[in-house]
Image (cartoon, rainbow, N blue to C red):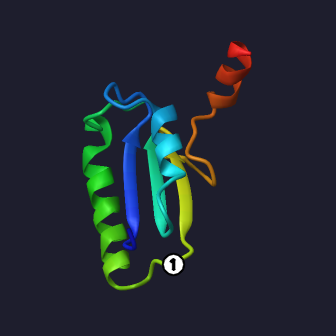
Amino acid sequence: MKCPVLWMHGEFDELTPLDQILRTWRRIPKPRELWVFGNEYHPLGGVGADFLSLGADWLVAALAGRIRPTHDRQVYFEKDGRTSEGDARPPWWDSRRALRA
């Protein structure tokens, strides 16, 4: 695959768990971008209008050649609109792993 990839995923997607998404994500070649929407499920209903608009903007940038071949970005979108860049995992993710150990 050589085209830019944008993957949008709900934090609590009941069809594909987030840990599976993250494992698969690592196998996708760059350029790539992963957006995880906090407290959302598979349909992304609560953020539908927002993610469609943001996704359309991303697509326009990709088609215009503004996504570099080395592009590798992950964003976690909080329910209140805040974002965390660099890691699409929810803030509670590492504490969950500690509890399992």
Identify the residue at image location x=52%, y=42%.
22
Please provide percent x and percent y for residue 72: 56, 64
Please provide percent x and percent y for residue 100: 68, 14
Q: Amino acid at mark 1?
A: Pro
**74 or 79, which lies in front?**
74
Q: Can residue 38 be seen in this snapshot? A: no
Is residue 35 positioned above or below 43 on the image? below
**17 or 35, which lies in front?**
17
Q: Can residue 55 be seen in this snapshot? A: yes
Is residue 98 positioned above or below 29 on the image? above
Identify the residue at image location x=47%, y=53%.
34
**47 or 28, which lies in front?**
28
Q: Determine crowd level at label 1: few under 14, some 14-19, many 20+ residues with C-alpha closer than 10 A.
A: some
Please provide percent x and percent y for residue 46: 30, 36
Work out which quarter of the rendered image holds the N terminus and state it: bottom left
Identify the residue at image location x=35%, y=60%.
54
Is residue 1 positioned above or below 101 on the image? below
Residue at image mark 1: 69
